[in-house]
Amino acid sequence: MRFKNIIYVIILVLTTIITLWSIPALVKKMVYESNGYPLMYYSSRLKELCIIDFREMKDAFLDVKGNVYPRSQYDSLLPLMNYRQLAMNGNLPDSLEGYAMDVKVLRSKQVVYRFRPSDVHSPQPKMGVLLEAMPKRGNLSLPGDYFRMDDSEMVFVNSETNSVNQAKSKMFTEELLEKGFEFPAKAFWGNPTVRKAYEEGYFCLDNKGELFHVKMVNGRPFVRNTGVSKRVAVKWFVMREVNDKRFYGYLFGQNGELGIVESDEDGGYRFAKMDIRPVDIAKDDITIMGNMLYWTVKIYNSKAMDCYGLKASTLKSLSTYHQEKEVGIWDKVADVVFPIILSPASPDNGYISCYVLHFSALAWILSVILALLFFVFMRKRLALHKNLIVSSVVALTGITGIIALLLLPRNRFE
Amino acid sequence: MNLFKALSYKEWMKTKKFILVVFILLAAVAVYSYIDITYAIRIKEAVNIWYGFIFQGASVSSLMMYLIPLSGISMAIVQFVPEMTNKKFKLTLHLPASETQLMSAMLLYGYGILFALYLACVIFMSVIIGLVLPAEVVCMMVSQFLPWITAGLAGYGFTVWICVEPSWKQRIFNMLISVGMLSVLFVSSFPETYSSFGWGMLLVLVSSFVFPFYSCVRFKQGIQ
């Protein structure tokens, strides 16, 4: 057959791509040990960020200045984090910084949020659901219809009949247009669950980049332009109906800003930016752990972690901490053995594609040496130009290329 | 009769019962999925069922994840194992046409039949599911089926590659490579996660068509 050698090269290249994914994944399963970042929390007693890693130090924890505290003081030095345990033991202080320590209040002021890049870079719901914001019976319930944002209208589809609810669609579309909303909508974000304290509906980004608040009150539309796009170009929004109703959710700006959209004194909307470094939502994971006095914001990726202790009322930074990622056994192995690692899945992206997860110059140099040895060893078994093709695959991919070659027929290039 | 018409007739004689079985199975699973969804709607209310599809990525028919790839693999076995017993495939390769043409004709017959079956299944399911679920969920279903359909078609090609391969040792290696190639299509079963991987699915599909020719040459050379 005329194309036999070309087909062999195609099989070799594709097999190598598969081994570049499967062999490192297998080795990682064998050697990987957790080397994640420690738990961070801003202590209201020490007025400093604490590093809590009981895997590393079994009986103690640190603050970022390097002071060591025994584990026995863990609860008392971090009272706003461990208030439940303190209350259970009867050790909850009466007040802190002039605020009464009431378990109910502490619980309502607690904020816990985790953001992953794959929250954004993954398939998003194509429809939304507007719950009744003022339910007659107290509990939130699904209304029986779902909405989609068409090019020129908001369409409600009745789930029982799978047909459009024309009257409701018209009512909401007219209200949106009256309040200045320009179709088509660029995005809409909500928190579609009945397991929350109350309903704030959806935040919709219109064609001009204006952020609108849309919810259903007593079966009628409530639409308002939040006006926050005057301060920040909206990239992403995460709706979170927090217990104390202080804010609507987290807003990510086009230039890496992160903040909350809270209600101002006049019942309007205000963007309160957090005093932190710019966030890259394609790469950075974020955790926010807040209490009534301080918020701890941790931004981390595969390279390093930045942590901030913020004042809860102003979101101004009180303390910062930077830590590089520790090099684990897997990182060391990968740096030496695998010049390149491919994968169809990425930890930062929910979509399947071909991701380059790792590149190591050291492993690549070793692969070139391996390829030279391979070339010398095979010089009498293979014609020169064929030996060059196979050796270059080994030079580019190292040990994974050799495994791919072993899987293919011996009598190559007859 | 034209050689390739005759060849297709030979393939049809070998596979017609199998095709009927796959057709019935696909139709049965499609109808079952519809019955299952309408049952769930009656019991748990449409609004809750829609919620699962729209927000939680529930699958319209998770059985298809197994049936579609297995039907492709079985089609190759039904079509090519009889050729390989007593090396009857040698007779086919001695027909008055090049081995590339003969192999292409046999492969395209298999791909064509499978594609027609899968296409009919997707269209049928889109219509019946569209009766009770919104267009968005039907689109999610089709996008979820795409990697499985690719796995069905590519599974067929890779199985031919394994069947036609004359050496047992190499057959095992071919199986390993095929499993690796197909597993790329099963990394995620969440709807629409493969929406930007069309080129990758096409690459797997094209390679599954190309690989069997290598085994065919080795078979013709009489490698043991």
Image (tube, coloured by chain):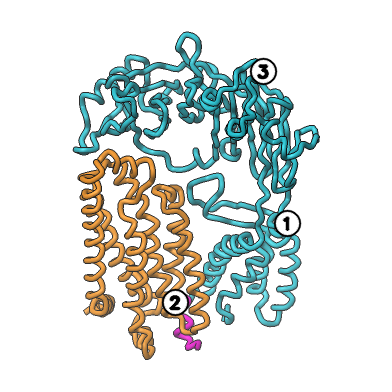
Q: Chain of mark 1?
A: A
Q: Are marks 3 and 2 in contact (CB under 8 Å)?
A: no
Q: Which residue is mark 1?
A: A332
Q: Nearer the viewer, mark 2 or mark 1?
A: 1
Q: Which residues are magenta?
A: B214-224
Mark identifier at residue A97: 3
Q: Nearer the viewer, residue A364 or A63?
A: A63
Q: Colour of chain B?
A: orange
Q: Chain of mark 3?
A: A
Question: Marks 1 and 3: same chain?
Answer: yes
Residue placed at 55% from the left, 67% from the top?
A15
Q: Secondary structure at mark 2?
A: helix
Q: Which chain is cyan?
A: A
Cα distance between the residues tagged 2 and 1: 38 Å
Residue placed at 67% from the left, 34% from the top?
A75
Q: Chain of mark 2?
A: B
